[in-house]
Image (spheres, rainbow, N blue to C red):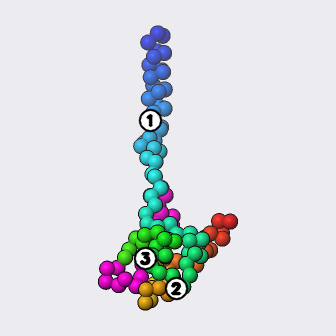
Amino acid sequence: MKNFLPVLVLSALLAACGTWRNPIERISPHKVPVQQGNAISQEMLAKLKPGMTPSQVRFALGTPLVVDPFRNDRCDYVHHLEKGGKVVEQRRVTVVFENGVLKGIEGDVQAAVAREEAGK
């Protein structure tokens, strides 16, 4: 009887471990949110007015992520956000200049407005 109890306990433990699925599948590493590029808010875009110089635009929005060396009449601001390995947000705003002054803004401007209004 003395030998029966340890065998019973060991059998119960082994049976319990056998029903437990692979623990590696349940354990996943923490994935840090990765933000790349320029996070441009609607408030920042509202500061832009036609006729601003490139240095004034750079002061309002920050340094552009992409500057075309062959065409100095545009600057591209790209924002990419990943959380948990999945793309949560991806935006692109292009600032267009003509004769050295701001002509217009293209890209995901309306998407930014709708997203910020939904968040309020």
Circle 3 SS class: strand
Q: Residue at x 45, y 51 (%)?
A: 31
Work out whether 52 lies above or below 62. Answer: below
Instruction: From the image, tell me which residue sits under label 3.
Output: 76
Residue 99 locus on image (x, y percent): 43, 90
- Name the kind of residue labelled 2 in the image: Gly
Q: Residue at x 45, y 33 (%)?
A: 17
Residues rendered magenta in the picture:
68-89
Residue 33 placed where, x, y %?
47, 56
Tell me the kind of residue under disc 1.
Gly
Q: Which residue corresponds to mark 1?
A: 18
Which one is closest to the eye, mark 3 or mark 2?
Answer: 2
* Residue 79 in sight in this render: no
Q: Secondary structure at mark 1?
A: helix
Q: Quadrant of residue 115?
A: bottom right
Quarter of the figure that contains the C terminus? bottom right
Choose the circle earlier in sequence order: 2 or 1: 1
Identify residue for label 2: 51
- Which residue is painted at 44% across and 12% down in the image? 3
Residue type highlighted by circle 3: Asp
Measure the alpha-carbon separation of dots 3 and 2.
18 Å
Q: Residue furthest right?
A: 120
Q: Residue at x 47, y 85 (%)?
A: 101
Say which element carries label 2: loop
Quarter holding residue 114: bottom right
